[in-house]
Amino acid sequence: MAKKKIRVPKESQTFIEGTAPERIPAIERAATKYVDARDARMELLESEVKLKTKLIEVMKENNQENYSFDGFMVELNHLDEDTVKVKKLRAASDE
């Protein structure tokens, strides 16, 4: 029986005095802002998925595949897996 290899995370590279690469604060600031925005988006995505699942459940409980209200149209699709789309309807122009 083959032994299972255990992966040990590598330590960050250390540099000899005077050989470390030059720090670029602008890149570090931009990267930090990007990471913050990405993390906020991912948290919002988790919330969106939960709310979408709840909307699908409510549509099924009320036996609705299409529903309109206040300028919105909700459509429940049953193709491969249940999905829902919420569209904002365009206001009728007076022309």
Image (spheres, rainbow, N blue to C red):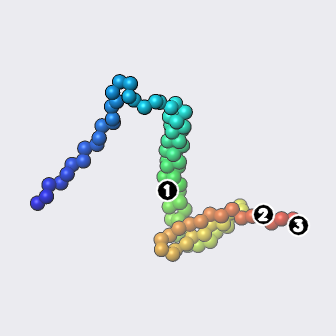
Residue 56 placed where, x, y %? 53, 65
Location of residue 63 with respect to 31 vertically, above or below: below
Residue lying farthest to the front in this orientation: 19
Q: Which residue is labeled 1 in the image?
A: 50
Location of residue 39 with respect to 2 vertically, above or below: above
Q: Earlier in the sequence, mark 1 or mark 2?
A: 1
Residue lying farthest to the right in this orientation: 95
Mark 1 crowd level (few <14, some 14–19, many ≥20, 10 Å Cα)? few
Picture residue at 38% right of the left edge, 24% below the top: 18
Which circle marks residue 77 in the picture? none
Residue 38 placed where, x, y %? 51, 45
Quadrant where the C terminus is found in the figure:
bottom right
Q: Which residue is labeled 2 in the image?
A: 91
Residue closest to the eye, 59 or 73: 73
Picture residue at 51% right of the left edge, 65% below the top: 57
Amino acid on which disc 3 is placed: Glu
Amino acid on which disc 2 is placed: Ala
Location of residue 58 with respect to 47 vertically, above or below: below
Residue closest to the eye, 13 or 64: 13
Which circle marks residue 95 in the picture? 3
Amino acid on which disc 1 is placed: Lys
